[in-house]
Amino acid sequence: MEEQVTDQEEKIKEGASVITREFSRDAPPILHLLVVGFHHKKGCQVEYSYPPLCPSSASESHECPEIWKNLPSLAMPDGSHNFVEDTVYFHLPSMSHPGKTVYGVSSYRQIEAKMLSKKTADITRSTVQKAVCVLSNLPLYGHIQVKMGLITEAYFREGDFTQFMLLHDAYNNLNMCLNPDLLNSTQAIIGLPLREMLERFGHKVVQLFKLILLQKRVLFFHSPVRPLSTSILAMLALFPGVVETGLDNCTALASQPDSIVVETVEVPKQFIPSPDESDKLDVATKPAGSPTVDATDDSKVSRESSFEDLQAPTAQEIENEKSGRISPSLVAGLPNEACGLPLQLFGNGYLCHPYLSLSYLDLLSEPNIHGYIVGATNVLFKQKKTLFDAIIELESGRIDVSDPDLRRQLELTKEDMRFADHIVRLVIQDRTNNTFLDGVGWEGGDEWLRAEFKTYLLFMLRTSLLDEGCKYVDEFNPAFIQAWKTTSNYAKWLERPHPAVLELHPGHMFSGQLSMSDVKLKITQITQTMQNTEKGRKISNAAASTSRAVAQTSKAVGGALSQAKGALSSWWSTFQQQPAEAAEEADETLGPNGMRMSDIDLTE
């Protein structure tokens, strides 16, 4: 059995190398570097491209390939005239590899025409709007954006937009310094505001995480474009490996087969949980609030992916284990390939576009598109409510879901709320207490946050293998688990070997008994969700009134206990009588809303 599992792991490694070679496509990292301008009569158009977009055309040609006909409107977004500068991340379908994705990074500027040293005939207005754009084979958004900002600044400083040698040099230099190996480092997520998303959405970031897993039709709305597109990619960066390799098919329609074919494997019987697995688990040996590693049978799984082979635990990790919680750095250290990751969230009709212009609005209603995550700045997208299952507004942090079934699936359990409170509290605390060293440390930083969500995802995957009705499934919301199992990304994950996941103990890493803090978290969630509604205001007022009632009741109870203590010290023979009278007095004490202390049940 050891040899069989080892062979499967070798296949995983071979598959990973195939994906890397397929991803590079034997093409330069940078396909084109181009200039997009705004013509007062023709609108947005390509003014220059190196190399030419169409091989038979000149670099100065305004012609775009049919499959990229909307490229100018992506590089210069809707409402760009309202901003002096902006950055756009967008996706295009590949022309040479059907179903594959080309990644666009556009750096937009608007300057006064009088600042130019040489004016061309098409400059007829007081301001000039142009964008320098890169089309790349690699999803190195932030890494490319930093370099593009410098290139665009130098290009505009020239004051002469006919000087194209700067663009030629930039194209060659970018191809020299970019390579697929950068995707295996933190360069893949540089510039993505992971922690800002936590501050913007708070506990609702866990709901967004689950919403993406359900592969629904989701719209992110905001203006300008840069925080919009970076926020979408930041959410995707919480999923292990999705930004690095999981977007390679995110423009493929349902009629286009995915280029990467996942081989269907037969999962050995010992990897499939039995129906009564939850009854056979030794709950007594599981620390409170945390799942543990199930490594009782060495013949069932390979020791090569076990936790013991990872790095020695730090003092913080040992402290976590003492408190009953496995350190996320241990679980997150499991190789993605051994866990069946990354999840294939996109491809074959499931799209991802960090930004879409108005020209794409009709595309979303085509029958060969099943789901998508898109960003838009034009209000007309929001008005087409039938096209979206959920609309997320970045400015207010609001999540608008009209379907009651979907709202029920996205409800957070008390364990989810504990997890959300844990990450939000530490991220905000890190940014508040360490202004100078913000993001330098591990806990509260971007990589720590990704490790937390990877751990959360792995335990959720492990728990999903259990039968419906199991108490561990309830910790993740059974309505969500049932809906998730019907998605294509879950079905594809089941087809891939995931031996490391099977070593984990099922259950939520924040499981435990209900406490008063859970009640407070639930009230916070409700008030945040309904803060702009009449019901939300009533709940807030009721919560405040209840807090005052409990405070006054506690004072009365304290007085009663003091009387009991005095009676105890004055006469020993009345020891049994006086506390009983004090307890009865406490039970009959009324708060301002007429509630007795004995009537209060914090478990409801």
Image (cartoon, rainbow, N blue to C red):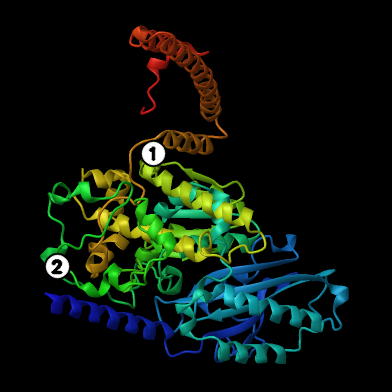
Question: Which residue is at the front of the view, 345 or 558?
Answer: 558
Q: Is residue 497 left or right of residue 372?
A: left
The residue located at (54%, 55%) in the rendering is 427
In the rendered image, the vertical position of residue 409 relative to residue 245, given as above or below: above
The answer for how far apart the CA atoms under marks 1 and 2 are is 42 Å
Q: Position of residue 557 (x, y in %)?
A: 47, 16
Q: Residue at x 46, y 84 (%)?
A: 181
Classify 212 as above or below 396: below
Q: Picture coordinates of residue 585 (x, y %)?
A: 42, 9
Image check: 285 left or right of 589? left
Residue highlighted by disc 2:
300
Q: Is residue 58 above or below residue 133?
A: below
Work out whether residue 593 or residue 130 is closer to the camera in this orientation and state it: 593
Residue occupied by mark 1: 404
Dot 2: what SS? loop
Residue at (70% x, 79% y) in the render? 150
Residue 286 x %, y %: 25, 50
Looking at the image, tell me whether mark 1 or mark 2 is earlier in sequence order. 2
Q: Which mark is residue 121?
A: none
Give residue 124's quadrant in the image.
bottom right
Q: Quadrant of the N terminus?
A: bottom left
Q: Does residue 346 appear to the left or right of 507 in the view shown?
A: right
- The residue drawn where x is 81% and y is 75% is 123
- 199 to the left or right of 306: right
What is the crowding at mark 1: few (fewer than 14 residues within 10 Å), some, or many (at least 20)? Answer: few
Q: Amino acid at mark 1?
A: Pro
- Where disc 1 sits, the SS reads helix
Figure label count = 2
Q: Is residue 193 visible?
A: yes
The percent coordinates of residue 113 (x first, y second) are 84, 73
Amino acid type assigned to the residue bearing label 2 in the image:
Lys
